[in-house]
Amino acid sequence: MEIEKRYLGLPDGVSEKDFELSVYRDKECTEEVKNIDFGPIEPGEEKSRWYWLKNTGEVHLSKVYVGMGIIHMEGWESRTDAYSAGSLEVGEKCLAAFQLKVAPETEPGNYSGSIPITVYGSESMV
């Protein structure tokens, strides 16, 4: 599954390159992750993978939400409000769960989609 980052509430005078959140496999934040492999997953099953989030930008992040991916009969769905990692100061990191759920009625097969991370840079946008 691809990690999709959404940045909202860019403060005045701040460019997008200053507003960045990175995902890492290790606590030292040296192995960046762009995709998550949940491995085989059966209908009705749910899996979680834990990764480190780090504010690698130049501004405070007011709120970070890690979404959930859901596979069902109609295809792929992502929910953006599954888990709140709270706020992150520049250079601060936290451990967060990325989740994938397969609805019980889903046919076995290969599916792809994205797990969203929504990052708010301004308290007024939260």
Image (spheres, grey):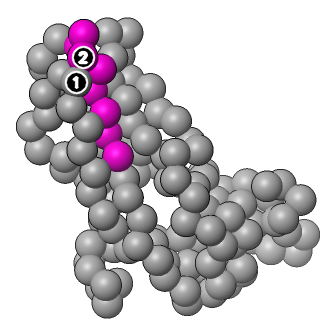
Quick check: can you spot residue 2?
no
Q: What kind of residue is marked 1?
A: Gly
102 part of magenta stretch = yes
Q: Give the side of residue 92 with respect to residue 95, left or right.
A: right
Q: Give SS at disc 2.
A: loop
Q: Which label was assigned to residue 27?
A: none
Q: Position of residue 49 (x, y in %)?
A: 27, 57
Q: What kind of residue is marked 2?
A: Pro
Residue nearest the viewer, comparing 114 with 44: 44
Residue linked to disc 1:
44
104 part of magenta stretch = yes
For residue 58, above or below residue 51: below
Q: Give the side of residue 64 with respect to residue 38, left or right.
A: right
Give residue 62's quadrant in the image: bottom right
Q: Position of residue 54 (x, y in %)?
A: 49, 78
Residue linked to disc 2:
104
Residue nearest the viewer, comparing 96 with 121: 96
Q: For the magenta stretch, what is the residue range?
A: 99-106
Q: Position of residue 28 (x, y in %)?
A: 31, 90
Asked if labels 2 and 1 touch by Cβ distance under 8 angstroms, the answer is yes
For residue 65, above or below residue 45: below
Q: Give the side of residue 90 with respect to residue 33, left or right.
A: right
User: In the image, what residue occupies the spot 30% across and 20% down?
Assistant: 103
User: In the image, what residue occupies the spot 39% across and 36% down?
Assistant: 69
User: In the image, what residue occupies the spot 52% across and 53% down?
Assistant: 83
Q: Whole-Å distance between the Cαs marked 1 and 2?
A: 4 Å
User: In the image, what residue occupies the spot 26% across and 80% down?
Assistant: 26
For residue 116, above or below residue 29: above
First in residue order: circle 1 vs circle 2: 1
